Amino acid sequence: MERPGEDTLVKYFLGHCTEQEEKLIVLYLAMDIDQEYVAACMKEAAAKMNAQPAEEWTSEKHQAAWHKIGKLKLSFPAADLENADYKSIAGKKIRLWKSLAIAASVILCLSVAGLYFNTFKKSSPQLAKSASAVATDHAPGKNKAVLILADGRKIDLTEAKSGALAVQGETQVIKTAADELVYDENNDDSDNTPAAINTLLVPQGGQYTLTLPDGSKVWMNAASTLQFPARFTGNKREVILTGEAYFEVAKNTKMPFSVKLNKMQVEVLGTHFNIMAYADEPVIRTTLLEGSVKLTNSNGQQMLKPGQDGILGNTNHFKVKAANIEQAMAWKNGQFIFDDEDMPAISRKLSRWYGVTVTDQRQQKGLTYTGAISKYKYVSEVLKMLEMTGTMHFKIENDKVTIKP
């Protein structure tokens, strides 16, 4: 794909593009782009914004532009963070975000100079240098899972070669060359024997993709388990989930699809949705991207429309709100996206993906972080990104990460 012109990219970051131009740019940014070229355009856009009168920095136009510059999910090479123009831009950005009444947060932004961060203080922002100790770093997670067959046999999918792995009743279990698991059913409707129940276990530091016997596809996040039949029979399709998974369900009006969770159930016909149901999270969150779903628990039912979150918390009643689709799908799309998240929430994500235990020794309360970084970075790189806010240092020893003042 031909890269957009410099003027067009600058217009995009300033919020001046036409709808057609924006679609082309979004497509370009999703591909293997020329990072130096995009960085130069981001720098020019930021400079143009910096030249505007200070009183205009609270306009919706500038807020949208900084959102694009701050949350663009790219990893540019480290650059000179002491650049004077760069500091000037960062200083004006603080005034913008103060006008949005979120001065208690810590904003992590991806800028033209690499990753930069600032806390909301009255003085000029200072970029913290790393003074943290890294005795043992941890690589990012990868495709890793264990399949447990109906008879209890375990197949390590990391070690297994591609090809046929097992036969469960009339269904063949296959590992593809793309390192995915596929259940290939022979579609013999006359076979009424009970289906074999299989379990896919994805440990910490893992992820895996599964195609169920009906053609539905499931992407599983780290520290998650899915229990499912090797063949769907009767008048319903039912699976049991702990952890997090994204589903693209094959449509079958005669056989509804349901996901059973610890405290609730999600019922669909054919749709795309994400479920986050970790035992250590305060809520169960269902995010609907396409179609419709019905949430059910002991207190009632709740329908969701595309773009909505269905949240079940301690009250055991469903709450519906507009979804942050980008954040909900970040794990599947290879990203960490922190949207006004505190350190305990971030720590849980890091623990699941890197297989570490995170302890926060700070006494500070109420700090939240916003930003994005690839989840395929080493854990130390993610922690250094957080450290640049000046709110923390860290130490890594074996599987333990300690956050310090």
Image (cartoon, rainbow, N blue to C red):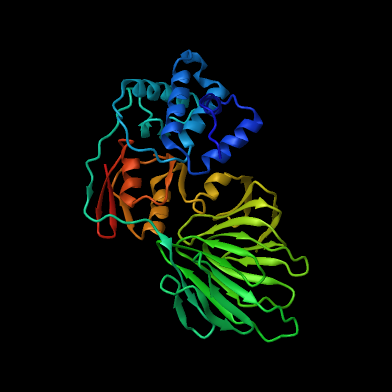
Q: Quadrant of residue 35?
A: top left
Residue 146 lies left or right of residue 384; in this view the side is right
Residue 54 lies left or right of residue 356; in this view the side is right
- Quadrant of the image for the C terminus? top left
Q: Residue furthest top?
A: 53
- Rendered position, 334 above or below 142: above
- Rendered position, 85 above or below 398: above
Give the camera-side residue of 153 and 367.
153
Residue 385 lies left or right of residue 31; in this view the side is left
Where residue 403 appears, as percent x and y from the top left, is 29, 48
Where residue 214 appears, as percent x and y from the top left, is 67, 70
Q: Is residue 381 visible?
A: yes
Q: Residue at x 30, y 35 (%)?
A: 390
- Rendered position, 73 above or below 193: above
Q: Residue at x 52, y 46 (%)?
A: 327
Where residue 124 appears, as percent x and y from the top left, is 32, 23
Give the camera-side residue of 309 and 115.
115
Q: Residue at x 33, y 58 (%)?
A: 357
Q: Is residue 301 visible?
A: no
Where residue 311 appears, as percent x and y from the top left, is 59, 52
